[in-house]
Image (spheres, rainbow, N blue to C red):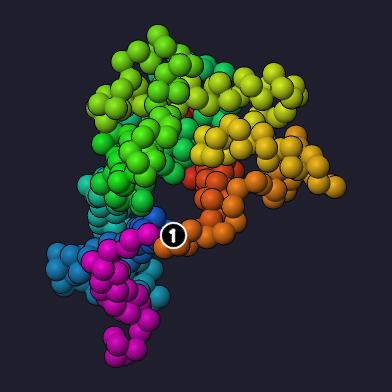
Amino acid sequence: MNPIKRWRWWAVLVLPVVVIVLNAMGPNGWREPVVRLLWLSWTAVAVSIALSASKAMADYANGREAWQKSLEHPIGAGLSFLALCLLRSAMVIAIVWASMTQFANAAEPAGIQRARALAPMVVSEIEQHWADMPRRSYLGALIEQESCPSLSHRMCWSTTAQLKTSREEGGGLTQFTRAWTAAGALRFDALAEVKLLAPKALEELSWETVYQRADLNVRAAIVKLRNCDANLTRLTPGLDDLTRVAMCGAAYNGGWAHLQQDRKLCGMTPGCNPNKWFGHVEMHSVKSREKWQGYGQSAYDVNRGHVRNTVPLQSRRAKYVEMLGV
């Protein structure tokens, strides 16, 4: 039979070539799902290499012939066929194992590698400054949202991450921001504001150390979220954990005052419950819905997108459950 007409040759020879070409192209924004698919396809690469190697090591053996002979004389030919199967199986397992151990880190985006390296520090900061923090994995999603244009970007999970324009500067893992008016006067300084919430714990935090000390950056975010959570609990006892996380996520991005205004607007709207975020407060806001020129999103879109990207478990949070806890 012509080998080209047999489907297994296409599976073990052509598919690996396609996989290698796709891998060489290098995924960008959709890197993560593509990388997972590529790793699944590497099984075909392992099979093709194992088949070629076993043929070279036992060129005198013919699997097809052994199979045919096994139908005539089950014992001898069958054992030969079994030996070939065991050889190829062992080689496939060895190659797959080597591939997974040698290249697993290369398959994982650089941002996630940095996240894993920083995760013990993040957990330590949570334990020290807010041991009862609900949805700990949210903090990982928040850092990704703030610092990662993509998971492979150099700024992703980097203390030196910076977003700076002539009138605004956001710095560090959690992108605390300061801004100036057109005349050059300081309009607000989120770093100075959060220091007032915990002067002793954040004594060393400054616009220099925010780019040097990941622990101070994470600690500042924890303090800000903790303060928001305490205020919500005081104003509205009984809010569930996920609602508080969502509302504080909106406040982290858009400010506490705007969150309260949005809740008030929701309360004035028939059918809207100001004590629920999803499907209620999230649908009503004093923020502008007009898209910023050259940006493609409005202030409302950015703020609500911030929550959608970080709070639901199916969003960015899921990947940080293992590192930080649920």
Q: Which residue is mark 1?
A: 295
The N terminus sits in image quarter:
bottom left
Image coordinates for residue 50, horizontal then vertical, percent: 24, 63
Examine the rendered structure and indicate whether residue 322 appears above or below residue 193.
below
Please give the name of the residue rendered at 70% of the width and 43% of the height, measured from the top-left corner.
Answer: 281
As for residue 247 lying within the magenta part, the answer is: no
Q: 199 or 323, which lies in front? A: 199
**SS category of the residue bearing label 1:** loop
Examine the rendered structure and indicate whether residue 124 appears above or below residue 300.
above
Image coordinates for residue 86, horizontal then vertical, percent: 31, 57
Question: Over which residues does the magenta segment extend?
Answer: 1-29
Q: What count of labels does the image hold? A: 1
Principal secondary structure, stretch drawn in magenta: helix
Local packing at callout 1 (Cα closer than 10 Å; few below 14, some 14-19, many 20+) is: few
Q: Seen in the image, is 258 located left or right of residue 208?
A: right
Q: Seen in the image, is 139 located left or right of residue 119?
A: right
Instruction: Specify the amino acid type for callout 1.
Output: Tyr
Q: Quadrant of residue 199?
A: top left
Q: Kindly tell me whether residue 185 is visible in this rendering.
A: yes
Examine the rendered structure and indicate whether residue 48 appears above or below residue 173.
below
Q: 246 or 12, which lies in front? A: 246
Please give the name of the residue rendered at 33% of the width and 79% of the height, measured from the top-left corner.
Answer: 10
Q: Kindly tell me whether residue 242 is visible in this rendering.
A: no
Please give the name of the residue rendered at 52% of the width and 42% of the height, measured from the top-left corner.
Answer: 310
Q: Seen in the image, is 326 located left or right of residue 71?
A: right
The C terminus sits in image quarter:
top right
